[in-house]
Structure formats: C-alpha cells, structure tokens
Amino acid sequence: MRYIKMIRRALALSCLLPIAFSVVAEPSKACGRISSFANPPATQDLHRVTIDRLNDKNVTSKGFYVLEPGIYQVKVYEQINDHRLRAGRNRGTSKTIEVKVEPNKRYHLAAEFIKDKRYSKTNKYWEPVIWKVTDEACELK
C-alpha cells in the first residue's frame, strides 16, 4: 500500500514538472500600450498630446507605443487648440506623467486644459492625464 502511494506521488510530480519548466523557461510576452493618437473629448477640455520621451529615452513620434508591463515616466507636449488661451503664450514646455502599464490595456493620454489658469505665463494651464483605459489583447513578438 505504501509503495502504491509513493508511485502515485511520483507520477503526479512528474506530470507537473514539464508545466513548471515551461513557465520558467518562456519569458513573458505580456504587454500594454500607451496611446496619444485618439481625439479626446474637447467638450471635457481634453486635447491631444505628443509623446516625446519614455523613461528618459527619446522616442520617434507615433500614435502608440507597445510596452512591457511596468511603470513609465512619459514626457508629453500639449496640442491644445482653444480660443480661450491667450495669444503668444510659451508652448515649448512639456510635462511628465507616470503611467503604470498593465497587460492587455491601452492607456489614452491627453492634455487637460485648466481654463481658470489660461492666463498663466507659465505652464499651469494644462496637466497630462490618462483620459481613458481600454482592454486590448497585446503580445510582444
């Protein structure tokens, strides 16, 4: 009887070993996306942004970036086209937003126009925001 129990345990463990090794041997292909190409709702004072850097690395300007899960510092420039902003303001400044990327998610970034600060001579008239998070399958190649 004791011998049969030992054989059953050995068989059970031998069935689990290939699964355990396949999980360890294959690196994660999970990913998420940070996006700036969708038009956020201007009726909510949200406007497009241009992504310039990810974690202090310059990036080529494009609509979205496929990334491994993790926390990213995303440097963006606002693209606010609103008649309520005073003319001649300095639009050459940027801001950074922290985004925690989770697998199979798309994070849509925008510039939130703060109309009460539209006359600010500094960069206080806007803040970068995540205006929408959507589910979307993603796998690194």
Image (cartoon, grey):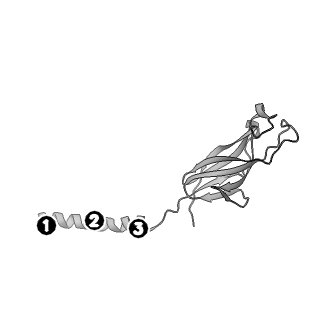
Residue located beneath label 2 in the image: 13
Could you say where residue 47 lies in the image, as x and y percent from the top left?
Answer: 75, 44
As rendered, which of 96 and 100 lies closer to the eye? 96
Pointer 1 residue: 3
Circles 3 and 1: CB atoms closer than 8 Å: no
Mark 3 Cα shell of 10 Å, populated few (<14), some (14-19), many (≥20): few
Q: Quadrant of the N terminus?
A: bottom left
Q: Amino acid at mark 2?
A: Leu
* Mark 2 burial class by Cα count in 10 Å: few <14, some 14-19, many 20+: few
Identified at 78% across, 39% down, the residue is 122
Residue 138 higher or lower than 133, as above or below: below
Q: Quick one: which residue is furthest to the front in this view?
A: 122
Q: Nearer the viewer, residue 1 or 68?
A: 68
Rendered image: mark on residue 56: none
Q: Position of residue 129 (x, y in %)?
A: 67, 43
Specify the amino acid type for callout 1: Tyr
- Could you tell me which quadrant the C terminus lies in? bottom right
How many badges with numbers are in the image?
Answer: 3
Precedes in sequence: disc 3 or disc 1? 1
| Vertical placement of residue 84 versus 80, above or below | above
Q: Are marks 2 and 3 in contact (CB under 8 Å)?
A: no
Residue 22 tag number: 3
